[in-house]
Amino acid sequence: MITWIALIVSLLLLLIIAQRNLALGMFVAAIFLGLMTLSWGGFFEQVAITFSDPSILALAGLVGIIAMVGGILEESGEMENLVRNMRIGKRPFLGTSPALLGMLPMPGGALLSAPMVESSGEELSGDTKAVINVWFRHILFLIYPLAPALIASAKIAGLNVYSTIPYLAPFFLLSVLLGYFFLLRETSTGMSYSEDFSYRGLLAPLGVILLAPITDIALKTLFEFPVTEYPTLIGVSLSFGTALLLSGYGPDELKDVAKKMKPWKYALIVLGMFTFLNVFQSSGAPKAIGSLEFPISVLVVGVSFLLGLATGRIQAPASIVFPVFLARQGGDAVPMVAFALAYISTFVGYAISPIHPCVSVSIEYFDSSIGQYVKKIAAPALISMVIVGLLSVFLL
């Protein structure tokens, strides 16, 4: 009974505090759950394990560096150059411009892509533009191997992030098709450009973005590392150095970028998430939940969706769903199919959630309302969840 009370209260604390600060919510939830279910020694042992794990420390470092890469590209105008030199039609531009900016974890990032959606989709309604900005901004989270949400979720599930991509790719294509059919088709296809095309403007920032995953894959193919996150850390560090060279930024400009991007915030999210995860796994809560009689598809699809909706996050649901799955089903890693179904379910809830900052700022920017937004996103979200639900019945 104490375990259940501690778990429920800790999740409530997480849900409430995470609306303002996800890292703080994770730490507070971990502290409450740990002190209620473990001895003092047991709790601090899990904290020590988290903060001494080189894999977790490397992951925390690399997500912070990714944030800095995004900040440098944005502040120096290189990301704007990339988007401006993509000579594609209006519909692809409406989807691709927020997607590219979504690759970079930036606070208030939806406000950066919103003007692009506004300028190229002037004939669209405000609710349509708001959903386009959110839906396509996050769509690459399904397949981009350096998306912090995907990296962290795969690690929690005990999987290699690159191994998950073939299983997530069909959902990515489904999301693109649904976004096109329900959102992009409402606009025309023509688009005019006021500036000359620049190969440099296109290829230089694109090279910075692609350098990290290419380096990561190459190093993992050619060498064996004691910690699997080290090649990724090297890759994002090279991207960071290249972005600095490209921008010509010195210490003062870099300091300004750091103030805006707050890379430590992303590192603290990772540390808080794995502190909660380790305490959660040691508390007995996963076994308690796993002992409940309900279909595994309810956990993978239903609980994942509801947690994504309730938290407006992807990492937090992964910290709860995957440990429970492993406690119930056994094994050291979540099966790929179960991972993909849970991840896409969380993604759909995350894309709808009014707690998700990108949703709220997009609604405000495009002068829409939460009711209009939900009505517009309902069809692609519902179709996605019906497909995922049916697959879970037959495949899990």
Image (tube, grey):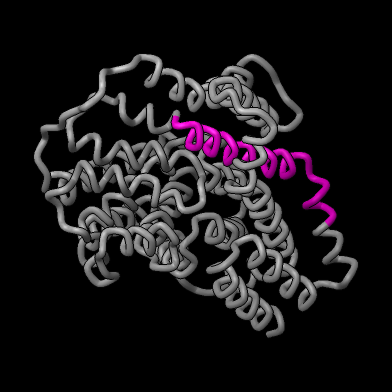
What residue do we see at 39% from left, 51% from top? 111
> In the current view of this chain or complex, which residue is farthest to the right?
41
Q: What's the magenta region?
A: 48-77
| Side (left or right) of 23 relative to 312 | right
Magenta stretch: includes residue 71 = yes
User: Is residue 295 visible to the viewer in this orientation of the structure?
Assistant: no
Tell me which residue sits at (49%, 59%) in the image.
313
Viewer-closest of 362 and 309:
362
Q: Give x and y (percent) for residue 356.
A: 44, 62
> Where residue 64 appears, x then y in whole percent?
64, 42
Q: In this view, does 236 lie above or below 312?
A: above
Q: Answer above or below: position of 381 versus 331.
A: below
Q: Where is residue 25 in the image (x, y as percent from the top left)?
A: 63, 67
Is residue 193 or residue 305 the one in the foreground?
A: 193
In depth, the one of 53 and 188 nearer the eye is: 188
Q: Residue furthest front?
A: 252
Answer whether residue 108 is visible to the viewer in this image. yes
Which corner quadrant of the image does residue 359 belong to?
bottom left
Q: In which quarter of the image is residue 291?
A: bottom right
Residue at x 82% of width, y 52% of height: 49
Quadrant of the snapshot with the N terminus: bottom right
Please, what is the dominant secondary structure of the magenta stretch? Answer: helix
Residue 300 lies within the magenta run:
no
In the image, what residue occupies the spot 26% across and 45% down?
A: 117
